[in-house]
Amino acid sequence: MINVSILAIPIALAGNASVMLGYVLQKKAIVKMDPIEKTKLKKNIRNFLTNPIWLTGLFLTLLSTVASIFAYAYGNIVLVASINGSGLMFLSIFSYFILKEKLNLKEVISFILIIIGVVLSGLFSSKTNTQSTVDEFWSLFTFRTSVLFQFSLLFVALILLIVEFSLNLNPAYSGIPNTLTAGIFMSLAVITMKGWSIYFSTPIHIDLTDYKFWLLGGLNTFLANIATILMQISYQKAKALVTVPIYHSSVLLFPTIYAALFLKEWVNISTQSKIYLSFSLSLIIFGILFLVVLKRKNEKSENE
């Protein structure tokens, strides 16, 4: 087993700043475009590829993906996914100055709760500082219960999509099921990225003849692209300060649960640390729910 490098922390932080700025720029561009769902595919593609602000956001998002590969190569899922939650701070700053989205005191409190949970989670998950080899990861990844968990998430994602596009949702909740679906797809992408990133750990040992390298990389790319497309739709349906926290918090929670249950990242930590980790994750969930409730109240007040 390989000790986790401290390099995972600054790399993950830099990646977060890049992706959050990218999301904000994409949101800024998309709100001025024709509705994605009502526009033909060719015109949608042209709208995206001819918009310099959206393309800049895409570049920053892709740059963050490179950072994530090396962050996961040096750190485990629990540590890096927890650090990724710090991006909420960058999001609030960028959204306030670029998108001119207002912040009230209660929303700030919800951000603080989420950030405290993220910091505590990162602190105690750093004790799980070991990584698996590619073969060890593959064995755990393809185990029966692991595969069942992955398909269960996909089934939940399907239900959420049906809720989003088949039911007449209250405007206050519009975009939230779709955002959670995007979070599920990106969570599965994070899991496959963890396995793929092991090839890039020190020393780099990429084997182009290893089918696992191509399969994990291909699955990661496919799942991440689906998540990105779904988020483009969410940007048009709800505020970035609501969709992105829900998205990134789900991308924190689902992979963390998976890592604890199937990748054995919590095996070598004490019961006390497990309790602290569970508390920190619960704090993040509470912060998310608080934020969603506030969104509904704010939308209702504006409509009145």
Image: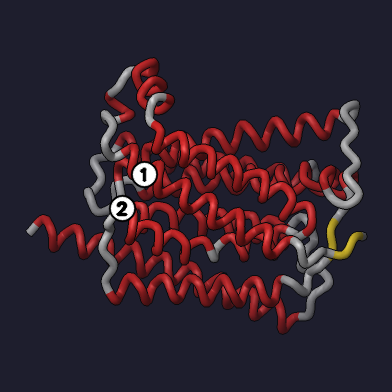
Three-letter amino acid code at disc 2? Leu
Q: Is residue 5 left or right of residue 44?
A: right
- The residue lying at 37 percent from left, 37 percent from top is 233
Q: Is residue 54 left or right of residue 201?
A: left
143 or 223, which is in the foreground? 223
Q: 10 Å neighbourhood of mark 1: few (<14), some, or many (≥20)?
A: many
Q: Secondary structure at mark 1?
A: helix
Q: Which residue is mark 1?
A: 27
From this viewpoint, which residue is outermost toward the left? 304
Q: Which mark is residue 99?
A: 2
- The residue lying at 24 percent from left, 54 percent from top is 172
Query: Which of the two discs, 2 and 1, sits closer to the camera?
Result: 2
- Residues under numbered marks 2 and 1 in contact, where contact means CB atoms less than 8 Å apart: yes
Residue 40 position, x and y percent, is 33, 17
Residue 110 position, x and y percent, is 39, 72
Residue 178 position by quadrant: top left
Q: Which mark is residue 114?
A: none
Residue 159 position by quadrant: top left
Residue 132 position, x and y percent, is 86, 54
168 or 290, which is in the foreground? 290
From this viewpoint, which residue is outermost toward the bottom? 272
How many discs mark residues in the rendered view?
Answer: 2
Quadrant including the N terminus? bottom right
Q: Is residue 51 above or below residue 22?
A: above
Residue 33 position, x and y percent, is 28, 32
